[in-house]
Amino acid sequence: MAADCTVKARPAHRIVRIAEDGRPRIEAYRCENCGAVTDSQTMACRACASRKPPASFGVGRTGKLWSWSVVHRSYPGVAVPFISVIVDLDDGLTLKGTLRGVDTSGLRQGLPVRLVFDDAGGAHDKEGVPYVGFHFVPQGDA
Ligand SMILES: [Zn+2]
């Protein structure tokens, strides 16, 4: 990467933001009236119809497993099986992702998990700038 290049990484998902210092975060929006959280900016709250636009914030990295599916159907370049999950983050946002580092026998609703940013499978753009993705691991794991 060229020394004058200011792009250190690109988000692999629309809700991932890369800060000036290169650190990734998940951005969400919270209604100041009712506290509802969404993953996209809206002009009014979808839950309470408040016309004050929900404010953005960076979500924390902890949450609980809500639902999962063990995927055995392959796609070129994707190793199977993997665990597709829906996680309720402690900050109120619900995300879909992949859970790693747990045997399927350890899956249970409410399992504490942690969000981990990763290199999106080693993907990079045509200029060699890496993408940043995310997955989940059980809390306490690296
Ligand atoms: Zn609201």
Image (cartoon, rainbow, N blue to C red):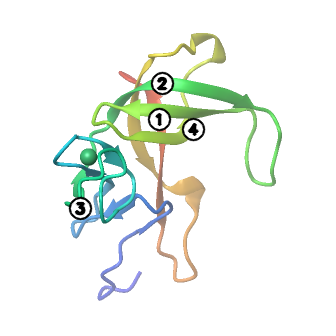
Q: Which amino acid does label 3 sit on?
A: Pro
- Left or right of 5, for residue 99: right
Does dot 4 land on a helix, a strand or a loop? strand
- Disc number placed over residue 65 in the picture, else none: 2
- Circle 3 residues within 10 Å: few <14, some 14–19, many ≥20: some
- Left or right of 34, for residue 2: right
Q: Residue at x 30, y 31 (%)?
A: 90
- Disc number placed over residue 136 in the picture, else none: 1
Quote the CA–CA distance across marks 2 and 4.
11 Å
Q: What residue type is labelled 4?
A: Thr
Task: Name the N-terminal-most of marks 2 and 1.
Answer: 2
Image location of residue 91, percent across then percent down: 27, 36
Does dot 3 land on a helix, a strand or a loop? loop
Q: Mark 3 points at which residue?
A: 53
Q: Name the residue under label 4.
A: 98
Q: Which residue is drawn at 34% across and 45% down?
A: 47
* CB under 8 Å between discs 2 and 1: yes
- Circle 4 residues within 10 Å: few <14, some 14–19, many ≥20: some
